[in-house]
């Protein structure tokens, strides 16, 4: 993140951002607005006039982490404003930390900015006052040139909607973030275009349910470059596939939080053509029809296996990642064994597993037959063994191949003058998947470069190689 030198007496804001990438986008938008209002960003507690803590409230463990972060900010700075998903539980926050200055909920941007103005009024000097200040966060979200980024310059999250229309038994996201609220497709595409023009090489499309984009607006049409486009995942994917970086190549475009609705099949050919990154993040959560029913999720696991096969026939390099919950109330050993056998057949590329945690306000808390903690741990160990074995075999199959890799970090020369680098393949999203470790890279290599790498070795999660000659 580029942070301009602060002006004399300029108020400074610190930010602690917790939770998912959607919350990170919220943090970026808040900081962007505050910078437009004359604030400087502080990289530490000591230099901040006020500290914002953007909380996560999805699981009880996340709430504990959020409360701990608030406590640390109070201890280190003393002037703390809380926002984000856990902000919906203001009483719990104030019970633990009565010193907080203000509390707002998820994506309540204007309320956060107002709280900062109240507790650390901007001290704009005469030169700043002469600059027209943007009004409203929507304008900022479409202006990457002035946007505060909390990710490296070469990749950016593109949030297309807020909220969710599902009522999964284990989840309280609709209570925290509301029902689905899709952004206008022309605004989304304009933001994507400007991000790519500003140097973004990889766009990560995020929402609570990417496949449902535009359902709430009846897939309204907007004009984009002289043609109508619908607020629909397939139209969005097609148009994002037309973007080009400064060197004329398509940026990597990853689709996250994709529910496997039938229209998802239509984006696979775009991946085969190289217009979208061959990667789908699908939150399956389980495979047993019994558990899926208890979770209030669609039980179409058999059809999904057929579609995975079809997707791989169309785009052999497609990588599918997912996450699964073990120990959900009512999950029997037979249900869990069904999940393991399904995973053996599905051969997913990347898998995360989570032990079920009760969340205050979730319907699952009232279900009978809770799974004892020791059985959750045993099942978690078993699913990780299976998925690590599958991952290791899939990565081993890439040894000897030359694949595209985006560079995230370039190291310093070692004692022999050799330079290493860390990057990601098209099968690896930042922060959640594996990495590609490179040896003997040239000094000119920089973060954001996309290079062809000859893969020399692998383990259960990562690849190792050298830039192809």
Image (cartoon, rainbow, N blue to C red):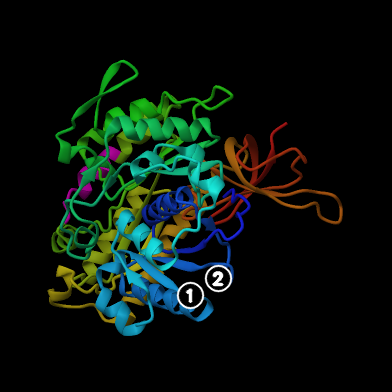
Q: Residue at x 28, y 43 (%)?
A: 210
Residue at the top extreme of this rendering: 226
Q: Give whichever of 431, 301 is nearer the camera.
A: 431
Q: Are marks 2 and 1 in contact (CB under 8 Å)?
A: yes
Check disc 2: other Cα within 10 Å, few if <14, some if 14-19, many if 20+: many
Q: Look at the image and give the residue range highlighted in magenta.
A: 297-307
Q: Is residue 189 above or below residue 109?
A: above
Q: Please give left or right for residue 141 compared with residue 43 in the image.
A: left
Q: Give whichever of 320, 234 is nearer the camera.
A: 234
Q: Is residue 58 visible?
A: no
Find the distance from the CA under tag 2 to the CA under tag 1.
7 Å
Quarter placement of the C terminus: top right
Q: Is residue 18 above or below residue 222?
A: below
On residue 59, the disc is none
Q: Residue at x 54, y 56 (%)?
A: 40
Q: Residue at x 48, y 75 (%)?
A: 73
Q: Residue at x 30, y 44 (%)?
A: 258
Q: Give whichever of 50, 104 is nearer the camera.
A: 50
First in sequence: mark 2 vs mark 1: 2
On residue 73, the disc is 1
Instruction: Say if the magenta span includes residue 302.
Output: yes
How far across and how far down the image is residue 229, in percent?
26, 24
Residue at the front extreme of this rendering: 126
- For label 2, the SS is loop
SS assignment for the magenta stretch, majority: helix
Instruction: Say if the magenta span includes residue 156.
Output: no
Q: Is residue 16 visible?
A: yes
On residue 45, the disc is 2
Q: Please give left or right for residue 73 compared with residue 43 in the image.
A: left
């Amino acid at each position: 993140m580029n942070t301009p030198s602060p002006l004399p007496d300029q108020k400074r804001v610190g930010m602690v951002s917790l939770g998912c990438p959607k919350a990170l986008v919220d943090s970026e938008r808040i900081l962007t607005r505050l910078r437009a209002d004359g604030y400087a960003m502080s990289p530490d507690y000591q230099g901040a006039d006020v500290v914002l803590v953007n909380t996560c409230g999805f699981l009880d463990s996340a709430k504990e982490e959020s409360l701990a972060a608030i406590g640390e900010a109070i201890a280190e700075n003393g002037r703390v404003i809380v926002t984000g998903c856990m902000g919906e539980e203001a009483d719990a926050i104030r019970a633990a930390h009565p010193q907080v200055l203000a509390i707002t909920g998820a994506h309540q941007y204007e309320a956060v900015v107002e709280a900062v103005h109240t507790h650390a009024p901007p001290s704009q000097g005469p030169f700043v006052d002469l600059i027209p200040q943007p009004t409203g966060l929507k304008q900022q979200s479409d202006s990457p040139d002035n946007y505060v980024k909390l990710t490296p310059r070469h990749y950016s999250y593109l949030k297309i909607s807020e909220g969710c229309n599902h009522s999964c038994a284990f989840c309280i996201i609709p209570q925290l973030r509301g029902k689905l609220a899709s952004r206008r497709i022309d605004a989304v595409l304009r933001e994507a275009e400007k991000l790519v023009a500003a140097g973004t090489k990889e766009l990560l499309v995020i929402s609570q349910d990417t496949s449902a984009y535009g359902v709430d607006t009846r897939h309204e049409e907007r004009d984009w470059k002289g043609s109508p486009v619908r607020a629909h995942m397939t139209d969005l994917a097609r148009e994002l596939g037309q973007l080009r970086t400064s060197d004329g190549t398509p940026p990597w475009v990853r689709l996250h939080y994709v529910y496997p609705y039938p229209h998802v099949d239509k984006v696979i050919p775009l991946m085969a053509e190289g217009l979208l990154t061959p990667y789908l993040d699908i939150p399956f959560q389980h495979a047993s029809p019994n558990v899926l029913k208890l979770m209030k999720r669609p039980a179409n696991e058999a059809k999904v296996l057929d579609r995975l096969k079809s997707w791989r026939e169309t785009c052999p390099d497609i990588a599918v990642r997912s996450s699964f919950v073990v120990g959900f109330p009512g999950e029997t050993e037979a249900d869990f064994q069904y999940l393991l056998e399904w995973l053996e057949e599905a051969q997913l590329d990347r898998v995360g597993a989570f032990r079920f945690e009760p969340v205050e306000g979730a319907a699952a808390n009232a279900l009978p037959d809770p799974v004892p903690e020791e059985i959750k741990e045993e099942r978690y160990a078993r699913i990780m063994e299976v998925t690590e074995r599958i991952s290791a075999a899939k990565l081993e199959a890439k040894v000897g191949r030359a694949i595209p890799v985006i560079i995230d970090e370039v190291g310093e020369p070692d004692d022999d003058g050799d330079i290493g680098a860390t990057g990601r393949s098209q099968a690896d999203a930042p922060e959640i998947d594996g990495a590609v470790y490179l040896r003997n890279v040239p000094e000119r290599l920089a973060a954001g470069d996309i290079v062809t790498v000859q893969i020399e070795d692998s383990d259960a999660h990562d690849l190792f190689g050298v830039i192809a000659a």
